[in-house]
Amino acid sequence: MAGCAKRCKQGLVKFVLSLHKLITGTLKKDKIDDDFEMSIVCHRPEGLDKLEAQSNFSKRELQVLYRGFKNECPSGVVNEDTFKQIYAQFFPHGDASSYAHYLFDAFDSAHSGSIKFEDFVMALSILLRGSVREKLMWTFNLYDINRDGYINKEEMTDIVRAIYDMMGKYTYPALKTDTPKQHVDAFFQKMDKNRDGVVTLDEFILSCQEDENIMRSLQLFENVI
């Protein structure tokens, strides 16, 4: 379980750093990506005053973030393929497409098939400056793939396998075929308090708050921006 948690943490840290680079204009993309983004209908974000009121960023910070976002995504939106290409840069020895798909769905809260600047801002606001409960709720929603309010073993297995695919077959120590199942079983042993076969939001938050390693990992995001 500790190894899986460590890999999850590494993946999320790289993810947040890559998003920071993307929306501040310091992540370089290929020209073909820029041309593709330009072909999408342009989107203008909501007023910055409204975003300031809804997020944990100041208006000045939002202006800087939007300037960088527009430099990298002139259309004002990011589709799933582009999102996967950006994320894959940080895991060259593995296949990050499945995990990036789940992350994309978590950011695309409206299920529109694209992520707008507002989506980035609200998610980053939670991940970087939200309360512990807000961060854990966001993570729970990431794992709750079918959005039914519970995490079941099938969903957690899909997430764990996606993480292993992302880290690559050269991960040290070498992963055995049955390792994902072992981590899922350990997850449910820890999180499923009433042993009903699913993990609720309350069970997830309580279990995470009881784990010092998880609490420390949440603090890693606080000084990214």
Image: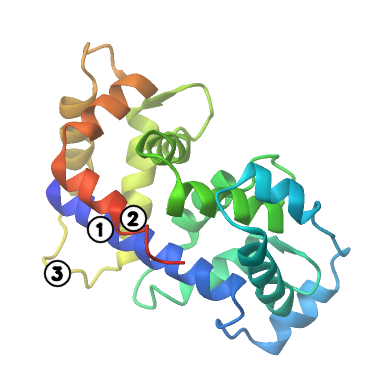
How would you rate the neighbour count of disc 2 (Cα within 10 Å): few for under 14, some for 14-19, many for 20 or more? Answer: many
Vertical order, 42 against 160 (above or below): below
Circles 1, 3 touching at the beta carbon (< 8 Å): no
Quadrant in which the N terminus is drawn: top left
Circles 1, 2 touching at the beta carbon (< 8 Å): yes
Decide which of 23, 165 is in the foreground and name it. Answer: 23
Q: Which residue is mark 1?
A: 7
- Disc 3 marks a residue whose amino acid type is Tyr
- Disc 1 marks a residue whose amino acid type is Arg
**What x and y, as percent, mark residue 200?**
36, 20
**Picture disc at residue 43:** none
- Disc 2 marks a residue whose amino acid type is Ile
Q: Secondary structure at mark 1?
A: helix
How would you rate the neighbour count of disc 3 (Cα within 10 Å): few for under 14, some for 14-19, many for 20 or more? Answer: few
Q: How far is mark 1 from mark 3, CA to CA?
A: 11 Å
Vertical order, 70 against 106 (above or below): below
Q: Which residue is mark 2?
A: 163
The answer to whether residue 190 is seen in the rendering is yes
Q: How far is mark 1 from mark 2, CA to CA?
A: 7 Å
**What x and y, as percent, mark residue 202?**
34, 20
Q: Which residue is mark 3?
A: 172
Q: How far is mark 3 from mark 2, CA to CA?
A: 14 Å
Residue 209, image quadrant: top left
Q: Secondary structure at mark 2?
A: helix
For the point 59% across and 75% down, the residue is 24
The colour style of the image is rainbow
Q: Secondary structure at mark 3?
A: loop
How would you rate the neighbour count of disc 1 (Cα within 10 Å): few for under 14, some for 14-19, many for 20 or more? Answer: some
Vertical order, 58 against 186 (above or below): below
Q: Earlier in the sequence, mark 1 or mark 3?
A: 1
**What x and y, as percent, mark residue 13?**
35, 63
Circles 3, 2 touching at the beta carbon (< 8 Å): no
